[in-house]
């Protein structure tokens, strides 16, 4: 491989990670819970260790990213905006090689008086 052609940024995509959560404004939402779907596009500064030498040390493990998301999802929030911020902020704080990210959180079957599959928010964050 030609090392002069290595990328400095890689985007990690996690699409619709399904997790149970207890988030919502109504007290019942925090008791019953709902299914949430988290989609992440994370721009990571990578080293030649990852792209040339197949070494995890030069990037961020998606398994570690998922652990952080699961941890933040276990803490109730009234607003999806707050939850998205917490998840994004924790990822940027915990992984110094993350340059920026886009997060989307969708809530399945929200209590809004009409039939809708999901309602969600998305947010962009950068270092």
Image: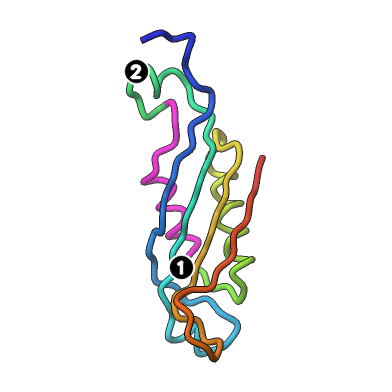
Whether 85 is drawn above or below 5: the answer is below
SS label for mark 1: loop
Callouts 1 and 2 close, C-beta under 8 Å: no
Where, by quadrant of the figure, is residue 37 drawn?
A: bottom left
What residue does disc 1 label? 74
Q: Few, some or many C-alpha atoms within 10 Å of disc 2 (few <14, some 14-19, many ≥20)?
A: few
- Vertically, is 3 above or below 22? above
Structural crowding at the residue carrying mark 1, measured as other residues with C-alpha within 10 Å and reported as few (<14), some (14–19) or many (≥20): few
Measuring from the top left, give residue 41's x and y in whole percent.
50, 46
| Residue at position x 44%, y 31% in the image | 59
Does the segment drawn in magenta span residue 100?
Answer: no
**Can you give x and y, in whole percent of width and height, for residue 86 in the image?**
59, 59
Q: Circle 2 is placed at which residue position? A: 53
Placement of the C terminus among the 4 image quadrants: top right
Q: Does residue 40 appear to the left or right of 83 in the view shown?
A: left
- First-in-chain label (1 vs 2): 2
Query: Magenta stretch?
Result: 58-73
Q: How far apart are marks 1 and 2 (CA)?
A: 36 Å
Instruction: Say how the picture is coloured.
Output: rainbow
Q: What element carries label 2?
A: loop
Q: Where residue 28 sits: x, y (%)?
A: 50, 90
Q: Which of 115 and 123 lies nearest the eye of the viewer?
A: 115
Mark number, residue 2: none
Camera-near label (1 vs 2) is 2
Residue 69 magenta? yes
Q: Quadrant of residue 98?
A: top right
Query: Principal SS element in the magenta part?
Result: helix
């Amino acid at each position: 491989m030609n090392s002069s052609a290595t990328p400095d940024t890689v985007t990690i995509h996690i699409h619709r990670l399904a997790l149970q959560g207890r988030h919502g404004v109504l007290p019942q939402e925090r008791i019953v819970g709902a299914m949430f779907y988290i989609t992440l596009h994370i721009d990571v500064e990578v080293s030649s260790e990852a792209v040339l030498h197949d070494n995890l040390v030069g990037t961020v493990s998606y398994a570690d990213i998922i652990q952080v998301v699961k941890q933040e999802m276990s803490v109730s929030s009234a607003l999806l905006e707050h939850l998205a911020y917490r998840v994004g902020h924790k990822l940027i704080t915990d992984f110094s090689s993350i340059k920026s990210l886009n997060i989307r959180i969708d809530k399945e079957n929200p209590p809004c008086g009409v039939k809708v599959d999901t309602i969600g928010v998305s947010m962009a964050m950068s270092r």
